[in-house]
Image (cartoon, helix red, strand yellow):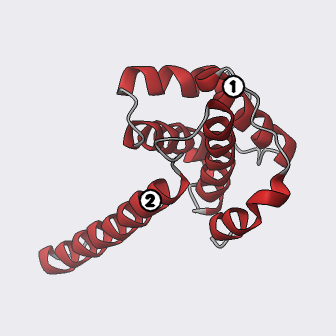
Amino acid sequence: MTTPDETAERVVAALLEWRVWLERMAQRFAELAPPPDASPEDRSWHLERACVRLVTHTLDSGADNAWRGQTSIVLVWFLTSAGMDRTGAAQAVENAIGGRFESWVYPKRTLIESVGEDLAVGLTGHAPYQDHRDRTALEELHDRY
């Protein structure tokens, strides 16, 4: 903090940056959400892929040592944006992550995918894995970030 004017400029810039990030996340949530009429298997696939992408996005956002907490928050926000109540969403995320992420350690892709699968199965009771070749266009849309 420096002069009141410089401090105000920094605060405004930070808030604008935060707003852009929140708007981008809201758009991402809408794109990743399972369609309302999705079968349990399709819903599971969408949830697993969303989790993997959102964890990876959070890791790449520069959250440094706060990435674990930010990841949980982002996943809860995603689930609530898809219609879950906050308490249920928080419990589902906690059940899926279960202490498997460690501070200052970038998780391996297999661990991220395992968390995504656990989240999807925990919420739908169905394994998410199907032949992804019939979802190539959707995969490419989601992978553009």
In this rendering, position of residue 12 left or right of residue 121: left
Q: Position of residue 27 (x, y in %)?
A: 42, 63
In this rendering, position of residue 144 left or right of residue 19: right
Residue drawn at x 69%, y 42% as measured from the top left: 45
Q: Nearer the viewer, mark 1 or mark 2?
A: 1
| Amino acid type at image mark 2 | Met
Q: CA distance from mark 1 to mark 2?
A: 24 Å
Quarter of the rendering containing residue 129: top right
In this rendering, position of residue 24 left or right of residue 102: left
- Label 2 Cα neighbours within 10 Å, binned few <14 / some 14-19 / many ≥20: some
Give whichever of 8, 38 is nearer the camera.
38
Quarter of the picture containing the C terminus is bottom right
What's the mark number on residue 99? none
Q: Is residue 126 above or below residue 144?
A: above
- Circles 1 and 2, Cβ within 8 Å, touching? The answer is no
Q: Is residue 29 among what the camera can see?
A: yes
Residue drawn at x 67%, y 20% as measured from the top left: 125
Residue drawn at x 57%, y 23% as measured from the top left: 94
Q: Is residue 97 above or below residue 12?
A: above
In this rendering, position of residue 13 left or right of residue 54: left
- Give the labeled residue for mark 2: 25
- Give the labeled residue for mark 1: 121
Quarter of the picture containing the N terminus is bottom left
| Amino acid type at image mark 1 | Val
Residue drawn at x 59%, y 62% as measured from the top left: 62
Q: Position of residue 55 (x, y in %)?
A: 64, 48
Q: Is residue 97 among what the camera can see?
A: no
SS for dot 2? helix
**Precedes in sequence: disc 1 or disc 2:** 2
Q: Position of residue 92 (x, y in %)?
A: 55, 23
Q: Position of residue 61 (x, y in %)?
A: 57, 62
